[in-house]
Image (cartoon, grey):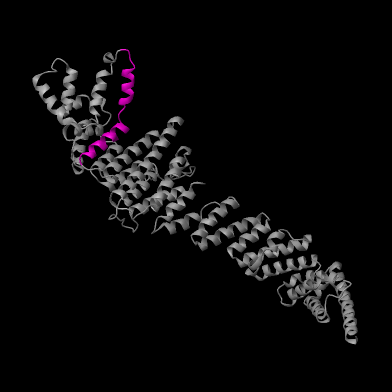
Amino acid sequence: LQQPGGSSICKCLKRPSPSRVFVVRKDQDIYIQTLRKLFNESHGIFIGLQRSEEELAGKSRKAQLVQVSKNYRSVIRACMEDMHQAASKFVSILSAMELIWNLCEILFVEAAAAGPLLLRLLDWVRLHVCDVDNMVREVLSSENPSKHELFWNLGNTQTLTEMELKWQHWHEECQRYLQDGTFASNSHMESICKILLGDEDAILEKKELLATWYQFLVTRLLYSHPTVKPMELRFYAQSSMDLFLGGESSPEPLDTILMAAFEFEMHQVIKECSIALSNWWFVAHLTDLLDHCKLLQSHNLYFGSNMREFLLLEYASGLFSHHSLWQLGVDYFDHCPEYGRVYLELHIERIPLNTEQKALKVLRICEQRQMHEQVRSICKIMAMKALRNNRLGSALSWSIRAKDAAFATLISDRFLKDYCERGCFSDLDLIDNLGPSMLLSDRLTFLGKYREFHRLYGEKRFSEAAKLLLMLMTAHIAPCSFWMTLLTDALPLLEQKEVIFSAEQTYELMRCLEDLTAGKSDKQKFQDDDVETMKVEMLRLALARNLARVIVKEGTLEGS
């Protein structure tokens, strides 16, 4: 089986032996370092095309689209140059890609008319096939150019790729010279005359100088039908391929693709390229460009999405399997109106969140697109990772961002447990700046308020600290398991020289202490260690002493 991208999935359906493991991977090309430039730079061209002014019409719009096409080709050529230096095996693949793209640009994007069409095809052949310039330099640099072994070959080759359309004059002159036998004594000149007259047999005699059948096609058109119309190309192309190959060899995949282009079968070009090429880059970007040219509007796939979106989705999905190129894939999904959002949601959840920096990057992408479910999922994953690593501050921050009340409660309990064990809080900056976030859960609210109590106490604002401490207990914000810690925190306030707690507040503290001790069974009381028992006794004594001081103070004030 073979997927449209050309990646071999399985050569045959056989039952695998128990001792073998088969690893199946798609889109291997995205892992090739030298192709990174192709993916990165073409991304900018793609985004620019999506944002371009659709209002432009006629020649202005066509010129814009032709320039976009040339920009894509320039990126391909730049990658080819880099690969030449690195002696990469992908040079020939990129060369074929540019050859196909350039032909599609001439026939579909620019849609050259009769006359200019042949000029464009001559440029196309010269750019991709001919090596005349090197031959000219070699012949001219020799001591005696006319005696050089490539001299007549060069003459024939230059004739085959001549760019000026003055063939009418040549045709008349050569016809007369040939009939008069002017060049009968010089077989080379006679051969050139026949070529200028468009003699197919004469051209085929020089077949070794023609690299491909499409070079033969352009040569044949130049000297026999220079004003060929676009829709006539298919007939000349098919006959030229048949004449050139002569039944000696069957067409290669590249030949099939080029023939489909000459026949103006755009969908067949895309299909054949999808099969022949090893990744989705080419077909995705070419199809997108053709879609902007309004050439694919009527072609929808049977399962709903159009061809452009289908290919872009496949290309972007491949990018998401790469550790950094996935960021490019996000923009491609954004420009797939029907299924892009769904694909993005599915793929973004599979990105490995190796670092907080990467998690924040993914989170920012989700927040910009109002992907609330994915935001919560990412935050929960990061909160759990931080908790496993005992990074409570980070875990609390992520849980607040996820608006996960249950997880925020769990982490708040861990903060309180650490405080009981160590006597101090970690991550004070985070707790001090919770703000409205502390309302996410009751336990988080208690954590924030309890930290505020410590801050007030540290600033010697004892009356405010005492009111806050009492409120935490009477309003049942504090967990019952933490009441003894709160009552113990009240001891320094009860022992201050200045009376802090009023009589009413002292009675409230006494009631809380009795509720705490009364709630324990006899077995629990027996199990309490001496330290707890001593704390209870110290609290009772301090509360009684404070109550006596308050009564004396309040009685003195009333007497005065």
Q: Quadrant of residue 246?
A: top left
Q: What residue is at 64 percent from the left and 56 percent from the top? A: 386
Q: Quadrant of residue 167?
A: top left
Q: Is residue 425 left or right of residue 65?
A: right
The residue lying toward the viewer, choosing from 270 and 559, is: 559
In this view of the protein, can residue 246 be seen by the observer? no
Q: What residue is at 29 percent from the left and 55 percent from the top? A: 297
Residue at the far bottom in the pictured view: 559
* x and y percentages locating residue 513 in the rendered image: 81, 76
| Vertical side of 37 occupied by 60: above or below | below
| Vertical side of 253 occupied by 396: above or below | below
* x and y percentages locating residue 170 in the rendered image: 16, 27
| Vertical side of 274 occupied by 481: above or below | below
Q: What residue is at 48 percent from the left and 46 percent from the top? A: 325
Q: Name the magenta segment's main secondary structure.
A: helix
Q: What residue is at 61 percent from the left and 67 percent from the top? A: 405
* x and y percentages locating residue 426 in the rendered image: 73, 58
The residue lying toward the viewer, choosing from 385 and 229, is: 229
Q: Is residue 111 left or right of residue 516?
A: left
All told, the count of numbered labels is 0
The residue lying toward the viewer, choosing from 179 and 86, is: 179
- Looking at the rendered image, the quarter that the C terminus falls into is bottom right
The residue lying toward the viewer, choosing from 315 and 337, is: 337
- Looking at the rendered image, the quarter that the N terminus falls into is top left
Q: Quadrant of residue 26?
A: top left
| The residue stretch that appears in magenta | 114-143
* Magenta segment includes 130: yes
